[in-house]
Structures are given as C-alpha cells and as structure tokens.
Amino acid sequence: MPLVYRRRAWEMAEAMATPEEVYLNRRKFMAMLGLGAIGVVGGSGWGATAATRPAWEMSRYPAKRNEKYKLDRALSEEREAGQWINYYEYTVHKSRVATLARKFKPTPWAIQIGGLVKKEKTIDLEDLLKRMTLEERLYRHRCVEAWSMAVPWTGFPLKDFIDLCDPLGSAKFVRFISVSRPEEMPGMREQPGYPWPYFEGLSMTEATNELAMMVCGIYGHALPNHHGAPIRVVVPWKYGYKSPKAIVRVEFVEQQPLTFWSQLQPVEYPFESNVNPNVPHPRWSQATERVIGTERRVKTLMYNGYGDYVAHLYK
Ligand SMILES: Nc1nc2c(c(=O)[nH]1)N[C@H]1C(S)=C(S)[C@@H](COP(=O)(O)O)O[C@H]1N2
Ligand SMILES: [Mo]
C-alpha cells in the first residue's frame, strides 16, 4: 500500500485522517482487489502474555476491581479490542498490530525520569510495580476517529507515580516518551517523516487527576504487546492518542510541550484534546461514536462521561 506508506511528514496517516466508515470501505475494497490481507492472531493469542512474562509480574493479576468507576455500557470483548488497535510504530492497519507486535520483548524494562525533578533517576519496572498497589478500573475509551470501546485496565494512579518522581514546584507539564525499536517496529520505518519516538504530554493538574492511570494490565492479566506492554498511560476523558503506550521516559517541564500528533497537525490534534461532542474534528463530526464489536452508534459524552471528575479543570 505505497499510497499509505509514502506520505509526507505533515500528512496524517490514513486511519487518523479518514472517518472510520471510509477506512472500513477502503479495507473492503482492498480485500476485493486481494490486497487487504488482515492479520489474525491465532488461538488464545489475544491475551496470552504468560509465556513471555516473568513470574513476579504474572503474580500481580488479577488485581482487585475498584468499583468506584462505573460503566454505562457493556465491556468490549478482549478479542474485539485486540484487533482494533492504533499503534503506529507497527502499522497504520489496526487489525495487523497484534500480529506484528507479538515478538516484542517487554522484559526487562525501565523508565527514565528526568527534567524538573529533585534527582534524575531510572526506575526498573519490577521495582515500580512492587511499590504500587494495582487495581482494576472499567473505563470508556474514545478514539478521535469516532469509535469507542470499554475495557478493564489494571494499574495505579498516575499521581502515585508522579509523587515517586518527586518533581520540582516549577514543573507545570509532564511529557511521556514511548519506546523506539525501529528494527522491530515496521511502522517507524514506513513513516520515516514522523517525529518518532511517539510522545505525549499533560498538564500537572491533568496528570494528577484521580482518573489518569499508569496501566500495566488489561482483562485481568499483564498488557499484551499491542495494548502497549509493559506500561502505558490512560487518560479516559481525552481522545485516545493522549494515552501513550510502552513508556520509556517521563520528563517534567515548565512550558506546554509539543506532542507527536500536534507537531504533525496542530489544528486537528491540539494539546488539550478533551473528548467533546460539540467540537467537530475539522474533517468529521465528533457527535457520535461506533462501539467496536457492534454496529451500534451512541452519542458521544462530554469529557467522555467523566465531567464530574474533570470539568472543573477547564473552567
Ligand atoms: N506509542 C503509541 N501510543 C499510542 C498510539 C500509537 O500509535 N503509539 N496510538 C494511540 C491511539 S490513537 C489510541 S486510540 C490508543 C489505542 O490503543 P488501545 O486500544 O490499546 O488503547 O493508543 C494510543 N497510544
Ligand atoms: Mo485514537
């Protein structure tokens, strides 16, 4: 699919640029032409992390569910969530990510902590998870492309991680940098004009809100590679791209930082990017969303339904 791969840096990849229906129709069209091979993970592949993960990590699951965070809809099936994935380091084709990511080794892993902190340090994932109490939360997830899912994440409040980082009072924003392994991640090579590695950011008030999580598990087990193993961020009131995967570095800064997508298209993917049904994307409506695994469209909720927790941040 050379049209997709040979894009200029400032153009969005196909799936980000196109309303989902068009993308789906294109897939059907490609399939008709015999070009649209769709990657399938065989057998129990969707959640099978056991073979690749150390015992100390496996022993943390399942974690106790925190019943405070309730859903207004059914959970998505793990299989559906696992074959509808944005992870551009691998590919722009959602159904192929899981297969391409299968060989990725998330162990050992460490996170560098830098910028405006008392002391820069590198924390080993094992040490980090041993210090944290893991819990499960059921959250809605709304992608900017107007689809959504509802999944059980396992992790801990991002605030607890930030406390551990010990940022200076001058830190007003936090940046997250994703892993970079171009030799294993074909999407990075296919989109050489993109500003890799993937990076995101939040204000400190957003990052310390109780909803923001560091996530290391899903569906009661460690994160499979395609969902961002071994550790990612989840910010449920913002569009999905504000939830970066496979974090290797966290940095505290004074000024609002650039982000991967806003560097490419600032008007379409601004820093704040709260879910808002009343503000259309420049190229499509955000009023409704398709619930993955179904044909159902539901109304998109302001702040993705989390206004009670976050609306005050934006007054
Ligand atoms: N590193 C990285 N993180 C990323 C992305 C990505 O391409 N690379 N895509 C984002 C987008 S657009 C979405 S919708 C979610 C999708 O992944 P999930 O289904 O595992 O939440 O991951 C986000 N985090
Ligand atoms: Mo997304």
Image (cartoon, helix red, strand yellow):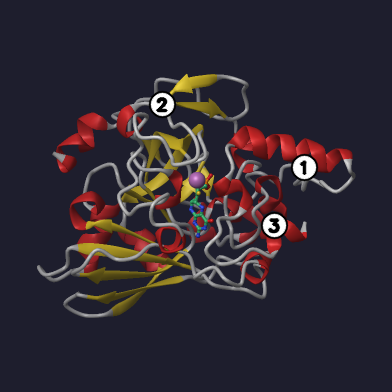
In this orientation, which residue lies closer to the viewer: 279 or 253?
279
Q: Amino acid at mark 1?
A: Gly
Residue 270 spot, x, y in % from top left: 35, 52
Q: Is residue 136 above or below residue 104?
A: above
Residue topped by disc 2: 300
For the residue pair 73 and 190, the one nearer the viewer reads as: 190
Instruction: Describe the element under mark 3 as helix, strand or loop.
Output: helix
- Tell me which amino acid carries mark 3: Val
Q: Earlier in the sequence, mark 2 or mark 3?
A: 3
Quarter of the picture holding the N terminus: bottom right
Residue 80 vertical position relative to residue 167 in the rendered view, above or below: above
Q: Amino acid at mark 2?
A: Thr
Q: CA distance from mark 2 to mark 3?
A: 29 Å
Residue at (89, 43) in percent of width and height: 33
Give the percent coordinates (x, y) of residue 20: 60, 36
User: Which mark, residue 4?
Assistant: 3
Q: Are marks 1 and 3 in contact (CB under 8 Å)?
A: no
Are there few (<14), some (14-19), or many (20+) residues within 10 Å of tag 2? many
Real-space CA distance between mark 1 and mark 2, rounded to the nearest whole angstrom: 34 Å
Choose top left, top right, bottom left or bottom right for residue 258.
bottom left
* Residue 86 position within the rendered picture, expressed as x and y whole percent measured from the top left: 57, 49
Q: Decide: few, some or many residues near mark 1? Use Cα within 10 Å; few <14, some 14-19, many ≥20.
A: few
Quadrant occupied by the C terminus = top left
Residue 215 makes an appearance in the image: no
The residue singled out by tag 1 in the image is 43
Does dot 1 land on a helix, a strand or a loop? loop
- Which residue is drawn at the image coordinates 41% and 35% (left, top)? 280
